[in-house]
Amino acid sequence: MTDRSRLLLLDGHSLAYRAFYALPVENFSTTAGQPTNAVYGFANMLANALRDERPTHLAVAFDVGRRTFRTEAFPDYKATRARSPEEFGSQLAVLDDLLAAMNVSVLRAPGYEADDVIATLAARAVADGLEVLVVTGDRDALQLVSDDVTVLYFYRTASEMIRYTPEAVEAKYGLTPAQYPDFAALRGDPSDNLPGIPGIGEKTAARWIREFGSLAALLERSGEVKGKAGERLRAALDSVRLNRRLTELVRDVDLPVDVGDLRRRPYDIAAFTALLDDLEFRNASLRQRLFAADPGGGRPPEPTGPVLRGHELGPDELAPWLATRATGPVGLAADCTWTRGTGDIERIALATPDGFAAAFEPSALTAGDERAFAAWLADPGRPKAVHDAKELSRVLPDRGWRLGGVMTDTAMAAYLLLPGLAAYGVVDVAARYLGRRPPSDGPDGLMLQAGAVLELADRLAPDLASTGMDELLRDVELPLSGLLARAERTGVAVDAGLLRELEQHFADGMERAADDAAEIAGRRFNPGSTKQLQEVLFGELGLPKTKKIKSGHSTDLDALTWLATQTDNGLPQILLRHRDLARLRATVAGLIREIGADGRVHTTFQQTVAATGRLTSTEPNLQVIPVRTEEGRRIRRAFRPGEGFDALLTADYGQLELRVMAHLSQDPTLLAAFASGEDLHGTMAARVFQVAPEAVTPDMRRKIKAMSYGLAYGLSAFGLAKQLGIAMAEARPLMDAYFARLGGVRDYLEEVVAEARVTGYTRTLLGRRRYLPHLTSDNRQRRETAERMALNAPVQGSAADIVKIAMLRVDAALAAAGARSRLLLQVHDEVVLELAPGEHDAVRDLVRTRMTTAYPLGVGLDVAIGTGPDWAAAAH
């Protein structure tokens, strides 16, 4: 590290794009639906660069648009680049907000690119005696490298970086930085749509520049280059000259700042802290690195909270502590472990409203203390605030304990108030609502968490009551957490031998598909390699180009599906089969991996993941097992009744979301279709296409079915076209015709968005809210994303609530009847039970009654029930 002032220049667009494609957008978004993967990745790279490079000056340059002096000289410049995804474009304004809160200079120059701004600032800084570091993912910046300018080049991912000094450039290319634009002009750049010389690769281009010293000398003496290579060079002289003009970075852009203006300034701490909270960036490491880089030494406010008088309990101290201290509400926190159906509690902490706390290890309790604690824990009259009651309830039976008297679950309460957060751990929820982060470890960490849980219970209760969701927590989510904990402990029995056979079956199918693909391609290649697929599909076979991505052209599922419709070549279809088999094999391998010592699979049901209220399933995810394909049914055959049980029962709601839509919209056509008891999709197809019911074709019915179910997901004309494989020109009139016949549905959907725009949220039948502040955003992408969420939240959320109520009522009825049969799984709108001998008929009747009466929908609820020796055979 030198004592010179140091200017750090970042290519904002380049780094944001790298971050966007490095982090899955579906994993990074706020509760309101704002994507944040590009912002998160950019902030992470910036935090690391500030920590590692310690610049005294800082600036970020962004492109303004596609029209620059380069497009004027060459209209096709960058013409092949796909439009930025909507999810990316909506994040640029957020990046501006982030950098403004950090008081970082952001520069844009109309008619120029970010590279030109960087080149200009670098030249000025060097003239002023500064050392310069350029952070980018664009190789054109290598021409700036000198003894005073170093390029930090990100490649492959957003975390892999090469440090280019003059020596590093020469080691990589055998050229000086000044020769790099000469080399680039010969090589061309597919990402910028600059043509190279056919048949001339990077090695030849670099060798020519080394031999002749410069591009100018090479072009002047091009006649000296012999053979086919010389002919190709001379045929491309004009395009090479143009390339050279376009690859040269401009170093004298008129900018409204001097280098001195770029000196780093302290953050606007209040704005910066609020923005990180709004973006829901909970990663402690990222926040710590960002705050540590503040030149002003600022830190976010960290309230200390109430002082806890806590201590470790020794032998025979727990019983008297409970008798004297735990006379009112108690906050409870626990360190739990859980693996494939077995769990334990390593440590428990308790906290009281008057500031006392205690911690102990269950394994060290004396007999008297354990009896006293078990009685207190199970007592419904001793109120307890817990965080993630399901996790605790799942492991308690391993110690013979039971949880009662839960007055609130602060994880579930936070989820109901703010559905869609990235995490609901006690530290995350406390940071949002209490303004501090209780430590997750250390001697007092768990006691501080127990205290935070008790505080959160008081903090969240009024909000729940004012929103009317306190009943949803008390009557649905809390009792459901106990039911799910029992289902997770129970698990579902599987035939491990059959699963291994299926894994091999799918592996053999993948091998056959690879052989078929090799036969068409004329050589073997890896169907799972994007690079090799691009070479074969677009290079060797010359198939139609798919959408442009960073590495070339897309080979994802949508791209292969599109290719299969655009060519008679059978390879795309074979690749789709290979991909499908690979997914099935991975599903089976995941199931095998998760089989417990009891021969059962113990999935984890997630109550706080889906913002709509739907339950999800992880480790393993049982919701990804296909039900409509023969291969998926083969996997389901491996799920069997366990010892002491002789069948499985499946009960599935029929057309649940459409029934909810009919109830909410009161559309007369939809209501009549359900009331008639006829084939709903056939009836609707006859009305939309204006044909007699007997004239409805399977294709008509398929399109109407996709439309009807798509309504519950905010389906757009673009989405319908993509789903049905039809043109937008056909999809739009189809949607218009649909809504012309279902005016009530159209009016309801419009009212939902209009009302949410005023209130800021949507509501389900049970009052579950989905907050959508971006409905009034000036940013079109943010607003349209929020509108799609507003369309689907009431229907999906109401359906999810009905399924939860049905599960609770079935479980309660089984207990009241003294039945041994038990509920095992919930997948989408289906529940799966394990049937005990002699209980089949009674349980079937019980399930049908409780599920069809779970909620009084105006069109009723329909349930299909089946039983059989395995999950597939129990289908209905």
Image (cartoon, rainbow, N blue to C red):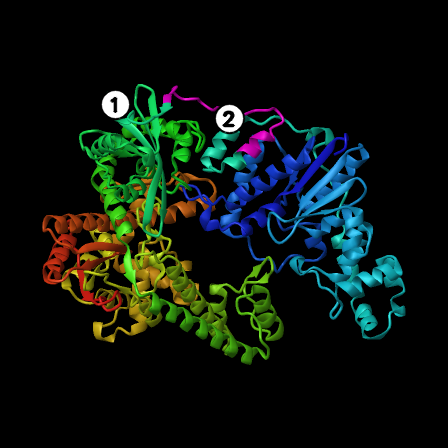
Disc 1 to disc 2, C-alpha distance:
40 Å
Q: Can residue 42 be seen at all in this image of the molecule?
A: yes
Whole-percent x and y of residue 438?
42, 29
Left or right position of 225 against 871 = right
In front: 576, or 76? 576
**Quadrant housing residue 461:** top left
Q: Position of residue 570 (x, y in %)?
A: 49, 78
Quadrant where the C terminus sits is: bottom left
Return the residue nearer the eye: 750 or 761: 761
Determine the residue positioned at 86% across, 58% down: 216
Q: Nearer the viewer, mark 1 or mark 2?
A: 1
Mark identifier at residue 800: none
Q: Is residue 308 magenta?
A: yes
Residue 476 lies in the magenta stretch: no
Q: Position of residue 137 (x, y in %)?
A: 65, 49
Q: Is residue 507 above or below residue 36?
A: below
| Quadrant in the rendering for residue 871 | bottom left
* Residue pointed to by mark 1: 320
Decide which of tag 1 and tag 2 comes sooner along the chain. 2
Kind of residue sitting beneath label 1: Pro
Q: Amino acid at mark 2?
A: Pro
The residue located at (76%, 36%) in the rendering is: 131
Residue 567's place in the image compared with 324, above or below, is below
- Considering the numbered disc 2 on the image, is that residue within a helix, a strand or a loop? loop
Disc 2 target residue = 300
| Badge 1 element | helix
168 sits to left or right of 299? right
- What residue is at 28 percent from the left and 26 percent from the top? 316
Tell me if I can see residue 729 in this picture: no
Stretch of the chain drawn in magenta: 288-310
